Amino acid sequence: MSLIAIDGRAGAGKTTLAAALFAELSQKHSVAVIHMDDLYEGWANALGVHLTQALETIVKAHQLNETFEIEIFNWESMNFDSTQRIEPVEILILEGVGAGQKVVRKAGATVHWLDIDPEVGIARVLKRDGNQIAEQMKQWQIDQELHFMSDKTRENAQHFQSS
């Protein structure tokens, strides 16, 4: 069983790469994709303990070839209000900021790092998601950089791609 993590700054194209890998790999393998946006605990706590604990549960279940459930965060109501059942698969793809953190790397994940200039990344996010999140994205840029520096995500990635 394989574990793939796609990480990098907001707007770098992580979701696009995950979709492309899914399309290619699912032709011959069972594949699932988990988006970090579904696991974040809102804006302020997105890259905190809750995400790490969720990832620990996910990678352990994947390693044991077990079915598991994840809580899904609702960005409109700003709380976890549903769950998603994940059946065992040959290849699990984790994508989003924080997907390649230490707990995932320790589980043997192959980590893809997508690089992008932060200003280009935020412009892409605002074009995609709307200017109503501009203030949150300013703080998000700080939060993600602090996370990446602390976790050394980029330094521990095996594959690099620039946008």
Image: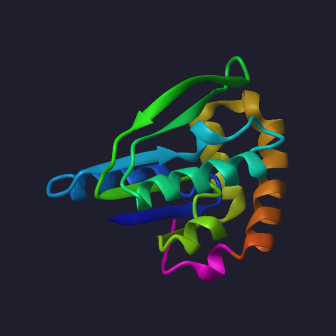
Q: Position of residue 134 (x, y in %)?
A: 78, 37
Q: Residue furthest left?
A: 28
* Near-viewer residue (87 or 29): 87
The residue at 75%/51% (across/down) is: 47
In the picture, which quadrant includes the N terminus?
A: bottom left
Instruction: Answer yes or no: is residue 13 visible.
Output: no
Instruction: Locate residue 136: give its quadrant.
Output: top right
Instruction: Locate residue 64: give its quadrant.
Output: bottom left
| 78 on left or right of 18 | right
The residue at 78%/38% (across/down) is: 43
Magenta range:
153-163
Q: Is residue 86 magenta?
A: no
The residue at 47%/70% (across/down) is: 109
Q: Position of residue 142 (x, y in %)?
A: 84, 57
The residue at 79%/73% (across/down) is: 149
* Near-viewer residue (115 or 104): 104
Instruction: Answer yes or no: is residue 35 visible.
Output: yes
Colour logic: rainbow
Q: Position of residue 101 (x, y in %)?
A: 64, 66
Q: Residue furthest top?
A: 77
